[in-house]
Amino acid sequence: MKGAKKIFAAILAGACLSGVSPFASSAAAEAAAEEEVLLNFQVVSDIHYETGRASYQYPKFAEKFRNALAINEEKFPESDALVVAGDVSYNMGKEAEYEGFFGDLSRYGSAPVNIVAMGNHEYEWDESGQKLTGRSDADFSIKKERYMRYVSEYTGISSETIYFDTWVNDYHFIVLNTEGWVNGNGDAYISDAQLAWLKRALAQRADENKPIFVIAHQPLSDTTNRSDAWPIGEASDQIKELFADYPQVIYFSGHVHNGHIGYKAVYNAGYGTLVDLPAFQYNELENTEAGSAIGYNVSVYADKTLLTPIDYITEELLTEETIVVDKAWYEGAADAADLSGVTVEGAAGAALTDGNTKTTSETESVMLSLPAGTKVSGIRFRGAPVPSVQGTVGIWGAYDMQASTYTLSDMPESCKVSVSADGETWKEVADREISVRYGTALSNENRTEWSEALGWVKVSFEEQEAGYVKIEFGGPCILSEIRATGAFTPSFPDTYEIQKLYESLMNADADLYTAESIEAVRAEIAALKSFVYGTSISEREVEQVKALLDQAAEKLEEKKAEVPDSSSGTSDSASSGAGSSSDGGESSGGKPSGKGCGSTALSVVGIGAMLVSAYIFAGRKRNR
């Protein structure tokens, strides 16, 4: 990895050494100084780039943005990406504002990848500058086309839909965007189709040890501070349900202009780590100075992700406010792989499986009995919750969090986990330090949910088939719940490979292959598109489509090298016949023409593809 990333690894690790992080031990943070940064990017929100105004209430936002790009180039020369979580324009999503913002991004930005979400300021005003007070599909259509055009032209990310995903250094970035005007309150319309696509996108190459970055302008409702006043909208609950299966998600949003940084801007209740970004334009609760401009520098390591605020005015990294998202934290409170049929043995009793955090048991060890043949890859447990919340209703009628914490009561410093098949021969599989967990930044309506959901400690290990799991704590432990967990399983088949293969075939280089073979292969695989990008494909169908695409790839016929003819007496017909064969055997050039897409071969393969497609559809119909 490049040297600058190692330098910044050491700088950012210093934030943890100060002891401000409740999520990672100081020993783990100290080790980060020597670890390799696998991904580095910067994230900002609510630029509100404006043009054509004679006076400004605040320092010119465009100038602040250009300054930030210059600072990024200087301080993060090895950055992999820049992420902007919406509201790139001042209030109208005007052509001039897009030209200014994306023009500056092109001229002054140095990140090789730019990921830009759409904010409500890009679609809630009509072309005359008036805020829409009623639904206007025509106005939104203009704004949608403009946004997608500039994203495609200036970032190279093109999509048939306004929502999209991309990969940077083998890490997944997913952008959620509104598909229409909603109500003039800043909400987003996230359709059922987009939710189905999100479920599919989250599953692609999902790895519980790697964060998935999701970017949207609006926060999920009842999560970060004041999110109950300006949420993403009706789709919040469905998105939370999808994230619950992928608690390694780190979700970035802006929109609310709180100005919080560090842990005050974080919410985690088992469906990802949600981060409220401060606004570049202005903030209302903290960092309210007119010249304030704060973003985050994000560095991903093998076992943790560090989010350090960047003050673009003082040009300082605010390391004392670094957020540490370690693996145990973003694996989260929820776990879709919880195993059923597990019983608790010993002093802990049934209280640990009753789902009630108020009933507790004190013990130094717990043994779980598993049904025969169960494969287990971890356990998670929690103590009695001790939440503390202070806040007031602010000027916008939304709850302003002043202080909130969550701790685990009477939790020892460490635990050991062992497994056994017969209850007598034990093998130690994990030994971990237990750190106190905190949760911060909640809205007014979710205090009960928050206090009940947080506080799980998870211990992962290599998958084992076991009849018993024993947890030995490093001292007396008051527990309220305990679970055995299985291997992480995405909630949707991984279609990444067939998608990339499909796209490579559809975009085959015409300079390498004959036009006939390219056209034939594209026609052959066109019928598979609905499966490649479908939102209900099965694992078996993925395998079938992969086989068909592999067959199609083999039929691409490479162009023959043109050898200069040294004999002036060679006829055109002779030279053209030298590289072809009508019987499907070896050509006179020594290459098997059977590799190509002759009309007979194509017909057979094409018929085969249609038959398999028909079989897939028929199978689906029978299984409904």
Image (tube, rainbow, N blue to C red):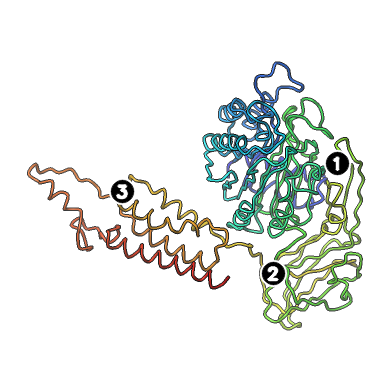
379 lies above or below 596: below
The residues bearing labels 3 and 2 have C-alpha atoms spaced at a distance of 50 Å
Quarter residue 363 falls in: bottom right
Towards the viewer: 259 or 158: 158
Upstream in the sequence, badge 1 or badge 3? Answer: 1
Q: Mark 3 points at which residue?
A: 515
Horizontal placement of 507 versus 419: left or right? left
Which of the two marks, 2 or 1, is nearer to us in this view?
1
At label 2, which amino acid type do we have? Gly
210 sits to left or right of 414: left
Q: Which mark is residue 486?
A: 2
Residue placed at 67% from the left, 26% from the top?
A: 129
Residue 1 x %, y %: 58, 45
Q: Where is residue 356 in the image (x, y as percent from the top left)?
A: 87, 67
- Identify the amino acid type marked 1: Ala
SS state under label 2: loop
